[in-house]
Amino acid sequence: MRAWYDAIGKRGPGVAVEFIGRPVRVEWVQEPGWKRPVAFTWGDRAYRVKSVVARWDDYGFGVAAP
């Protein structure tokens, strides 16, 4: 399934979002109140996180099946 949306309101370019369902390894730094992602590895490629445009707290279901 692929959905297109405008990441920053009507001012910016659209961003493609697609659910892949494969593991991603994330590197992060601890900051007050949250862990800020700085890089991730997906498949055989490593990516740097340029900016975090949104975040939310996830409180749940860590032992539940995905």
Image: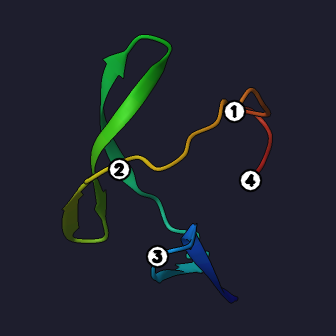
Tag 1–tag 4 contact (CB < 8 Å)? no
Please tell me in which quadrant of the rendered image residue 29 appears. Answer: top left
Quote the CA–CA distance across marks 2 and 4.
Answer: 17 Å
Q: Position of residue 30 (x, y in %)?
A: 34, 18
User: Looking at the image, which residue is at 46% across and 76% down?
Assistant: 12
Which of the two discs, 2 and 4, labels the residue nearer the N terminus?
2
Query: Which element type, helix, strand or loop, lies under badge 4?
Result: loop
* Front tag of 2 and 1: 1
Quote the CA–CA distance across marks 4 and 3.
Answer: 33 Å
Which of the two discs, 1 and 4, labels the residue nearer the N terminus?
1
Which of the two discs, 2 and 3, labels the residue nearer the N terminus?
3
The amino acid at mark 2 is Arg
Which residue is more in the foreground, 32 or 39? 32
User: Looking at the image, which residue is at 70% across and 88% down?
Assistant: 1
* Front tag of 4 and 3: 3
The amino acid at mark 3 is Gly
Q: Which residue is mark 4?
A: 66
Please tell me in which quadrant of the rendered image residue 46 appears. Answer: bottom left
| Label ID, residue 12 | 3
Residue 19 versus residue 36 in the image, above or below: below
Quote the CA–CA distance across marks 1 and 4.
Answer: 14 Å
Tag 2–tag 3 contact (CB < 8 Å)? no
Residue 37 versus residue 7 in the image, above or below: above
Q: Which residue is mark 2?
A: 25
| Label ID, residue 58 | 1
Q: Position of residue 25 (x, y in %)?
A: 35, 50
Left or right, 44 with respect to 9, comes to left
Query: Which element type, helix, strand or loop, lies under badge 1?
Result: loop
